[in-house]
Amino acid sequence: MSEKRVTLIQKRLEAAFSPESLEVIDESHKHIGHVGAKGGGGHFQVHIVAEAFTDKKVLERHRMVYQALAEEMKTEIHALGIQAFPPSK
Amino acid sequence: MSRDVQAEIKETVEKSPVVLYMKGTAYAPMCGFSGHAIEILKACGLKDFVTVDVLSDQDIRAGIKEYSSWPTVPQLYVKGEFVGGCDIMREMYQAGELQQQLAEFATAAS
């Protein structure tokens, strides 16, 4: 289940940004039992480096990632840690 | 039923200079991300800031996600403007930007 989610997130981000590097980490196990985890949505960390983030402010970069995952944010994803940078950084 | 949540949020974030929408309270955060946001604000030298517990108000919990088109909590507002969530706060803090933006509200030396 969890692995499927990670794959789904990876696919969405690859389609949206053609990233130079991409890592999606499932951290759902860290949050078992906490209030927010009740709904069944997972906790994930995304590390993504892509040309699309060049010259974008941090708020914009994070919005772009959320937008690419808009559908998943409603159900599959409860919390998402984001590190999104352009290639130079 | 006639509650205008968006207007309520607007009033809240404009009434106080620093407002954090979070899960739980500053003393008892109910989520690691919210707890981290509190730590960052304290590290910026802030003692008095307003927190709103979204877990105690389902209308606000849903409404705050619409207000700034931002899907998660915590959310930090400074002077009525949306700054970002926990990761953005951390990134800005590490770059020294958040301290600058909050300097005028910091109490004493931190």
Image (cartoon, coloured by chain):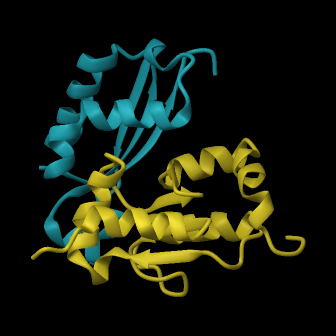
* In the image: residue B4, left or right of residue B20: left
Residue A36 position in % (x across, y down)? 27, 70
Question: Is residue A26 shown above or below A59?
Answer: below
* Figure quadrant of residue B57: bottom left
Residue furthest to the bottom in view is B27
Residue furthest to the right in view is B109
Question: Is residue B102 shown above or below B68?
Answer: below
Give the residue drawn at x 23%, y 68%.
Answer: B4
Give the residue drawn at x 72%, y 58%.
Answer: B102
* Figure quadrant of residue B17: bottom right
Residue B72 position in % (x across, y down)? 34, 55
* In the image: residue B71, left or right of residue B15: left
Residue B109 position in % (x across, y down)? 90, 71
Residue A42 visible in the picture: yes
Shown in yellow, the chain is B
Q: Quadrant of the N terminus of chain B?
A: bottom left
Give the residue drawn at x 53%, y 70%.
Answer: B15
* In the image: residue B93, left or right of residue A36: right
Colour given to chain A in the rendered image: cyan
Q: Quadrant of the C terminus of chain B?
A: bottom right
Nearest to the observer: residue A13 or residue A32: A13
